[in-house]
Image (tube, rainbow, N blue to C red):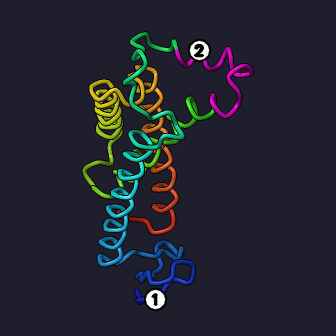
Amino acid sequence: MQQLFLLDDAPGVWAHVGLENGVRKEKVTRKTKQRIRWLGRILFIIYILLLIYFLFFAESYGRTAFSEEEYHYNLVPFREILRFWRYREIVGFWASFLNLAGNIIGFMPFGFILPVMHRNMRRGWLVVPLGFLLSFCVELIQLVFKVGCFDVDDMILNTLGALTGYWAFLICDKIRMIHYGEEI
């Protein structure tokens, strides 16, 4: 027997509650699933706009044009990662953190939100290459417009960020599956 209840821990989320093998299971309604997907789309748009700002326009992160200086780029994998790790005391914690962890953290929302928005994006073999492709496009724009530096290590770290975000999605999805017992 199922009844419709307003969930206490999620205001505005309606669920059908029933017993399955003596265990209380809650099922999310179709309308709630649509709201979750729309919220994911809105968050994704906000994320992309913030990404564009921080990667191309934020002067405090060294995103100024290289008109007076010689443009630098890195095509050797792990060169900049190792350099920032070796000289972390010299360049400072903040610079190392922004370069290494910032590139990973910056792409985690991509790997997390994309599977929330689209059911067919729930496979890692799609999400991770799309994260790489987005990172490649960002680096290519930086190379063409000479804003920031083209760095293959950034693509590695960004792709790792998309993968980490996807793993976080999988963990949250598994917890949700245990609680609700169905796909969203």
Q: Position of residue 34 (x, y in %)?
A: 29, 71
Instruction: Give the percent coordinates (x, y) of residue 17.
Output: 45, 82
Residue 149, image x, y percentages: 41, 24
Callout 2: SS = helix
From this view, report whether residue 122 is shown above or below residue 32. above
Q: Which residues are magenta?
A: 80-96
Q: Secondary structure at mark 1?
A: strand
Closer-to-camera residue (179/140): 140
87 falls in the magenta region: yes
Q: Is 75 within the magenta?
A: no
- Badge 1 local density, few (<14 within 10 Å), some, or many (20+)? few
The Cα–Cα distance between marks 1 and 2, rounded to whole angstroms, is 54 Å
In the picture, the disc for residue 109 is none
Residue placed most toward the observer, 13 or 22:
13
Q: Residue 5 has which mark?
A: 1
Q: Quadrant of the C terminus?
A: bottom left
Amino acid type for the residue under numbered disc 1: Phe
To which quarter of the image does residue 57 belong?
top left
Checking the image for residue 82, the label placed there is 2
Q: Residue at x 54, y 40 (%)?
A: 60
Dividing the picture into quadrants, the one containing residue 29 is bottom left
- Rendered location of residue 91, percent (x, y): 67, 22
Dominant SS of magenta comes to helix
Residue beneath the point at 42% across and 81% down: 15
* Amino acid type, mark 2: Leu
Within 10 angstroms of label 2, few (less than 14), some, or many (20 or more) residues? few
**Residue visible at 36% across and 53% down in the picture:** 49
